[in-house]
Structures are given as structure tokens and as C-alpha cells.
Amino acid sequence: MPTTAAIPAPGELGNRTRPAPERILRTALATAADNLEPLMNLYQPYVEGVENLPADGRFLLVGNHTQVAAAEVILIPYFVRQALGKQVRTLADRQFGKGGGLQAALVAAYGAVIGSPEAAATLMRANEPILVFPGGGREISKFKGEQYQLRWENRYGFARLAIEHHYPIVTAALVGGDDIYTSVTTRTGLYGRASEWFSRRLDGRADMAMPLLRGVGPTLLPRAQRMYLRFGPPITTTPPADVPAEGWIHQVKNDTQARLEADLKELQEVRDTDPYRALNPLSWRAAATPTSAGTRH
């Protein structure tokens, strides 16, 4: 198991001395990451495709955001680190860098950087594994009927960068985070439209509107929910000789989205028939598990 000392320092920030709060948080988070194994063994997340991760660490993980974004930001890097001993560098939504203070320190301490083409290019030149969510922060707010839907629209930047730096893409589909809470309002309803209006007034972005949620019964207590994660086979980004550059960028983006959507659909089917879905201790031994062939039993 990797040790705290094995976590690399951020390469994209040069040789500057990190502030004391960031150093303390980095040490605390690294220690927590090194001691998650007993919790993972008890919690038993369903994980497929770890063998698809390129051993050299040069790959771009492309994932989906859920309502509980901490789930994917913790689970995906954890299993990469367990498999390869490498720290994943997450490209965080620029909204997380605006707050400064503790929020910014947490982002930096976890090894994340505020997402930008320049930051991603620097990390790729350093051959580091990178995690990106093309939908950004707007994919976290799920109104009724939007669970596990990708909101990528014209997000082609990740494909362009992967192609430029010859980085293969590995999809990381996560199911479970959108089941902890239930959205009770639609985006097009009265509340949804009002929430978009307030969001636009506050930060100029209507896509950061927040739905009304409920957890256990009518409360905001989170539901117990198992997580289901799948790493897909690497998607090549080496352009064929007979495909125009822009056409290849579109194809890589579309292939990545199609792969991720297919995996999300299949993982929901696994979840629907899993007796351990709600983390019932009586069903722990009957929990669905992947086989070596990538199917479940």
C-alpha cells in the first residue's frame, strides 16, 4: 500500500513553498487516504476495470459528476492509487478557486488544480494521471429526471488536450451519488426557473441552479447507498491519417461520452438488482461483485 511519503508534490506549481495551512491539509488528507482500506472493505464499493488503467500513469480519466461530488473525487483517485501507487491530479471547476481561504487550500492540498488548458497541459508534460469532469460544477445540481445525465454540450477541450499530448482516455463511470438524495423539482418548473434566475444574479451562471432535495423520508438525512464504479478500456487519441483534426476531436469527445453513458446505464442495472444496494448488513455477503471477466455475479 502506498505511504504518505510516496505522494508527489504538485509539479505544475514549480518550486514555490506551499503555505503552512496547505502543507498541514496535504499531510492530513494523505494520511486519511492511506488508512481508507478498512472502511472500503466494510463499505464494499463495486469496482470494475482497474486492470484497464495504463501502468505508466499517462492517462486522462474522464468522469461524471453526481449530486455528492465528494464520492467521485475520493473514490476514483483512491482506487487508482491502490492499483498504480500514483496520485491522480483532479482538474477542479473554476468556481472552487474563487472562494480562497480554506476552500482553495483544500483543493490544492488534495492535489487538484483549477481546471484550465494551461494547467492540464503542464500536468500532461509531467506525465501525471489526470481526472476531469467535462460537465463541471453544473453537472452536480441534478433536478428531477436528470440523474446520471451528462451535461457536456460543446465541451471538447478535454479531447483536444488529450490528442495534443498523446494521452489515452479512460472513462470512470460512477453510480450511487445521485441516489443519496431525490430531487423533487424540475428544471423547467416554477422553482427551477426561479433558482436559475437567482443563480444568474449571484454569479452570472444560470446552470448552477440548485434543486429542492429530500433524503430519508421528507428529511435531508442522506440515504445509505453503495457506490458502483467502472473504469473503461483506454480510448486511443492518436489521430488517423485520413481524419481532419477538428473531426477527430469531435469523434474522440463523442466516443468518450458514448462509452461513459453506456457504462452508467449498465452500472444502474447492476445497482437495481444488488441486494446490498442500501448497505443492509444482512445483505453484505450477497453483494454483487465483478468477476475477472468484468461481469457480475
Image (cartoon, rainbow, N blue to C red):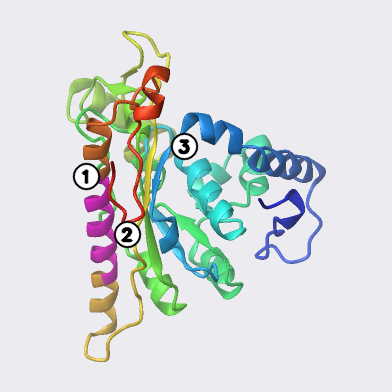
Disc 2 to disc 3: CB gap under 8 Å: no
Please tell me whether residue 156 belongs to the stretch shown in magenta: no
Mark 3 nearby-residue class (10 Å; few <14, some 14–19, many ≥20): some
* Residue with the mark numbered 3: 71
| N-terminal-most mark, 2 or 1 | 2
- Is residue 23 something that shows in the picture? yes
Which amino acid type is marked by label 3?
Ala
Name the residue rendered at 51%, 60% in the picture: 130
Which of 242/235 is in front?
235
- Between the residue at mark 3 and the residue at mark 1, the CA separation in whole angstroms equals 18 Å
Give, as a single range, the part of the protein colored magenta.
252-266
* Residue with the mark numbered 1: 265
- Percent position of residue 171, x then y: 36, 57
Magenta span: helix, strand or loop, mainly? Answer: helix
| N-terminal-most mark, 2 or 3 | 3
Name the residue rendered at 68%, 65% in the picture: 11
